[in-house]
Image (spheres, coloured by chain):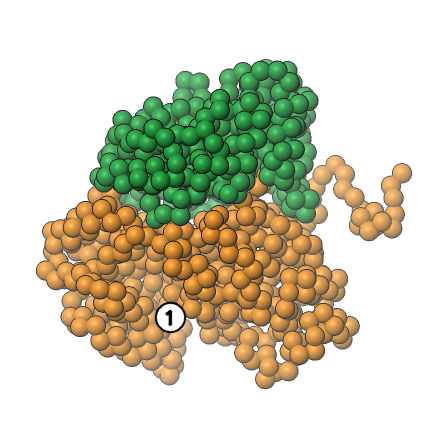
Chain colours: A orange, B green
Amino acid sequence: MDGGLSATTATLTPFLLDELRRICGEEWVYTQEHELRTYESDGLLQYHALPAAAVLPGSAEQVQAVVRACAQESVPWVARGSGSGLSGGALPISEGVLIVVSRMKRILEIDKDNARVLVEPGVTNASVSAAVAPDFFYPPDPSSQIVCSIGGNVAENSGGAHCFKYGFTTNYVCGLEVVLPDGEMVMLGGEALDPPGYDLLGAFVGSEGTLGVATKAWLRVVPVPETVKTLVAFFDSTHAAGEAVGAIVTSGVVPGAIEMMDKLAIEASEKMANAGYPIGRGAALLVELDGAEDECEARFSEVVRICEECGSDDVRVARDEAERQLFWKTRKAAFPAMGRISPNYFVQDGVIPRTKLPEVLDRIDELAAEYDMKVANVFHAGDGNLHPLVCYDGAVEGEAERAEELSGKILEACLEAGGSITGEHGVGVDKRKYMPKMFEEPDLDAFQKLRCAFDPAGLANPGKVMPTPRLCGEVPGPYRRHPLEVAGLAERF
Amino acid sequence: MATAPVAAERPDTPEEAAELLRTLGEARRPVRIRGGGTKSGWAWDGEPVALEVVTGGLSRVVEHNEGDFTAILEAGLPLARARQVFAGAEQMLALDPPLGAADAATLGGVLATADSGPLRHRYGTMRDLCVGITVALSDGSLAKAGGKVIKNVAGYDLGKLFTGSFGTLGLVVSVAVRLHPLPDATATALGSGTDPAVLAGAVATLARLPLEADCLDVAWDAGGGRVLVRFGGAAAERQAGAVLDRLRAAGLDDVQSTADDEALWRAQRDGQRSLDGAVVKVAARPTDLATVLGAAREADATVVGRAALGLSWLALEGDDLPGRIEALRAALAPCPCTVLDAPEEVRPSIDPWPDADPGAVAVMRRVKERFDPARIFRPGSFVGGI
């Protein structure tokens, strides 16, 4: 399917194309189909569209000049990092420009004394931690961290397995240099915290590329914990494992990570990772505690005890770093491993209040039975973030559509339980249609107010996030300067 | 003048509040919002207001989902009362700002001012704990963003936009928050010194260690100061004991630890406010700490600070506050210095707000125009004259 995103504004003129080439250099402006194919989709392959042009600027100044040129010609644009997003957020616009920031991958400053790093947006997530190792690390750790970019992380407010304890991208970005859709460059925050005024930084992180494009980011890093302890416990059912999660969290333990896989996910992952996991068990729970040695040791025995009390007769504690890595490899294999038990699958990303886990899992089972399809479940269990994997065979007529429908019903079940339509993948183009199920008209209006404050012309990633395209009206008010006045071409007397 | 008495309205439901604001919006009658009234002297009004909207009628605990560690609270609820409710379940909202006279500070007021206390070191501010928000705007709409789950990226994060907006965008009606386990024990290690560089050096050492402390503060008063680090949880006393050698090695004196630490931290919170003087909040880098302490010594100010975060509250008493604040700002430039408390008679000669990035201020103006086109919410009181 295509994203259905076609701009109603101007098309790419030869003049603009010349401008783009002048700004970025001939070799960094792509307009041929074979060059553009690379960028037709992000990580969500079912949506694809070719942009009119893709540009790869090499500096913030070039990004600014590109955005300014687009603004002058009223041409929409989409910013793209590594293209690993899973909601079609970086899906190009067919008449628009795709601004790819992947060449901008310099780490500009490492300031361990202040626990800060200044990076360009194309820097990968994992290389931030690598740059401050071994004594510091950058906590947000999406599973695509080896390839995904900080620019994309900022747009999506990326999380990861460790965000239950450590928080999300938004908790670690303290400053952004941003090119606004009109081509102005502003600094939101900086190396220090608490800049005066509205928290535009907080509003920008997670805005999915609709408020501007970040060209530099000040990130906060933290000291590497003294110790890490990891276990995997097997249970007969996800219910029993869910009870263990509840008991661990209410006991006051804040695990670094707490991840669950169901029977089908265990089976698939084991086939790929060969970790010796028992095929046929109902659920596997991976619990990782990190922190100060004393506190960690005490809490870890408590976690083992809770798992056993909740019915686990098979608790495996990682004996060394190699075994810990194997546990994680098995968990992270769950997505790709699905390919071994099913020709195709959709990854869903829903959130529920954690205590609703049993009833929502029952509902997912019911739905799977109703549609006669397999659904494997992996969760970031601590924060109630579910990733049901809906298995289907794309070669069978109509099955992809039914799988998508089932996937949508799972989201509705999440909403009915008081949850959200996305915990970390974003709305993008994929979940626009679910926004009205989660938000009412006044809520969407308020979102639009924010968007219009940043992008009144609607040129930054239009067609994403909001369920239907909206225009920004004039601000009603007693007096506003006429555009001619603003341009200095007329004065009011 | 800012605190001149004006007529007040006290809506009892979110719908009533929204309807009231619609009427005021249509009539373009400027309002200010009042929670517990403990910080109403901050960000003194730029333009006269016709009415005060008091949030006392909106003070319900709408939900406390113990198993989920979340709650939905109306904005007029005093933080102290919320704390009691959560403590009953051995949970806490990890926000400990000074609560003001009669512990009256409300959730809405703490959100609007982005106020915080020592726990900020580990848990951040309302910005980091708010997972959902409902606001009433001057067009009479009730809009929500976020939700009540702790992980959620659907829609824009208006909770952060409204945190620290000082009531200039709309009325916060309710807020959904993430809760944390209430530690069953706490302990604090501390040491003192008279040289700002030694104190700053001790902080720098601690900040680089993976301590997982709840709080890491500095205090300065009349030529001497101290560094305090607090731990929570079963191993708190051992953890506090384990940093004593570090504090000694950093050159601090009177190094000790105590589990009876509540008074120490109350003093840190109290140091963020002044009854008859002025308080200047300085936002700097952590490595600027020695400079900030030095400037405070010159200005004869006391200091409490979130040392590893680079945030300090400088309190000044006595004469010529405007002149001394100006000198402080000059000494600490370009660090933003915001004046919070100030005696009423000196306010006209002090701009409470520091300079902000002009490009960012232009966006802020547009945010204000979009959210409050009737311009009724405390016009002229915010950064850049917003």
Residue A149 screen position, x and y as percent: 49, 65
Against B364, residue B86 (above or below) is: above
Q: Is mark 1 on a helix, strand or loop?
A: strand
Q: Is residue A466 visible?
A: no
Against A332, residue B49 (above or below) is: above
Q: Residue at x 40, y 48 (%)?
A: B208
Q: What is the quadrant of residue B330 in the picture?
A: top right
Q: Residue at x 29, y 69 (%)?
A: A329
Q: Residue furthest right?
A: A493
Q: What chain is tagged by disc 1?
A: A
Q: Residues within 10 Å of mark 1 (few under 14, many from 20)?
A: many
Residue B163 screen position, x and y as percent: 51, 38
- Dividing the image into 4 quarters, which one contains the C terminus of chain A? top right
Q: Is residue A219 visible?
A: yes
A220 or B55, which is in the foreground? A220
Residue A108 screen position, x and y as percent: 56, 60
Q: What is the quadrant of residue A401 in the picture?
A: bottom left
Q: How many marks?
A: 1
Q: Which residue carries the number 1 mark?
A: A346
Judge from the rendering whether residue A231 lies leftward or rightward of residue B280; answer left or right.
Answer: left
Q: Which residue is drawn at 62% across and 71% down?
A: A56
Q: Which residue is drawn at 54% across and 16% down?
A: B276
Residue A87 screen position, x and y as percent: 47, 65
Against B139, residue A280 (above or below) is: below
Against B273, residue B69 (above or below) is: below
Query: Residue flagged by tag 1: what amino acid is it?
Result: Phe
Judge from the rendering whether residue A32 lies leftward or rightward of residue A405; answer left or right.
Answer: right
